Amino acid sequence: MDNHLKDEHILRQALDDPSYFSILVDKYQIPFIRKALGIVRSKEEAEDIVQETFVKIYNYGHRFKKEEGIEFKSWAYKILMNTAFTHYQKLKKTTGNVEFLDPLLYEEKPDENTSDLASIHDARAAVAEVIARMPEHLARVLKLYYLEDKSYRDICKAEKISIPTLKMRLFRAKRLFEKLTAGV
Amino acid sequence: MDMVQKKQPITLSDFLKNRILWKVYVLWFARRIVPLMLLQVAVIVVSLKLFGDNVFVSKVLQNIGVVSGDGYWQVFKYLVAVFAQTRLIVQAVVVLALGVVALLLRDVLRSIFTYRSLWRRKE
């Protein structure tokens, strides 16, 4: 019924009438879970992340302003990625502490969580190494956006560039990052 | 017959979806309704206090008891007469309190209807 509305309009309406929010939940649950699964590789963890993400989207919905180059989708995905990353860090700490106490870990298939944990420990060093090999202007935006969690506006101000330029730079940076990590 | 089955995408269970919507509802209620209700209740309390200070309430209730034997219409007429004869400040307080009670009722009903439509839309 309300599916013809744009996401940002649905969000705005949901702030007045929360029943509209179920439209966004229905629309984004599958891509969000898929994305979260790509990070934590556990269905339960991914569901927790998605749940937290939706609540954050609603909680901070009043701060979202549609501007040129900033879509609801990219804003929502950024929240998802930040939540997933925070979750991932917590998971790393928790599993680090209870690694040898939690029987669930022993019951898992050896190549699921355990291989993940190993990769978590190496991830930071690997990312830093790859970024160091990238051209400075691309590395800088990648770091500011994904690691330091700066907004588009802040990065544009710092780099003295427009939002479309930043988006293009991020796109190129991501592509190069993927290329460089392909061989790692 | 096509024997190839498509892999179903993972979706949130109803339990999780309900939990998200419940949390969203709580946020909305805490942000939109609670501050309004607190303000309305505060205004009603202050109005009642002013009303109590300016009106001999037990006497009014006693008189209502006397006229109530003649039916609701007589009670209504008595209240209108009392209202018309009282001081302007009391009249203003009564009007304000009635208005705020109406707003409070509206917000209570809005919360209930929003809660119901939350699950209806989900279905």
Image (cartoon, rainbow, N blue to C red):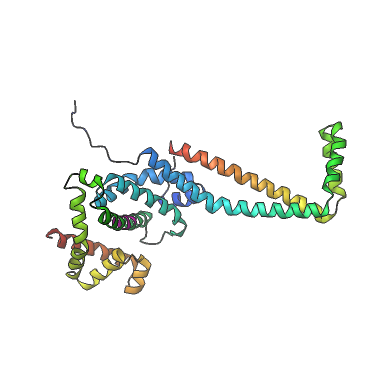
Indicate yes or no whether the magenta region holds residue A154. no
Q: Is residue A12 above or below residue A169?
A: above
Q: Quadrant of residue B81?
A: top right
Percent across and percent down for residue A39 are 25, 53
Q: Which quarter of the figure is the N terminus of chain B placed in?
A: top left
Majority secondary structure of magenta residues: helix
Residue B53 seen in the figure: yes
Q: Position of residue A73 (x, y in %)?
A: 35, 53
Q: Tell me what residue is drawn at x 79 percent, y 52 percent.
A: B52
Residue A70 falls in image quadrant: bottom left
Q: Residue at x 53, y 42 (%)?
A: B114
Query: Measured from the top left, where is residue B68 in percent x and y?
Result: 84, 34
For image coordinates 44% across by 52% down, the residue present is A58
Asked if B89 appears above or below A31 in the picture, the reply is below
Residue found 23% across the figure and 37% down from its top: B7
Q: Which residues are magenta?
A: A83-88
Q: Position of residue B6 (x, y in %)?
A: 22, 35
| Residue A13 shows up from this direction | no
Q: How many marks?
A: 0
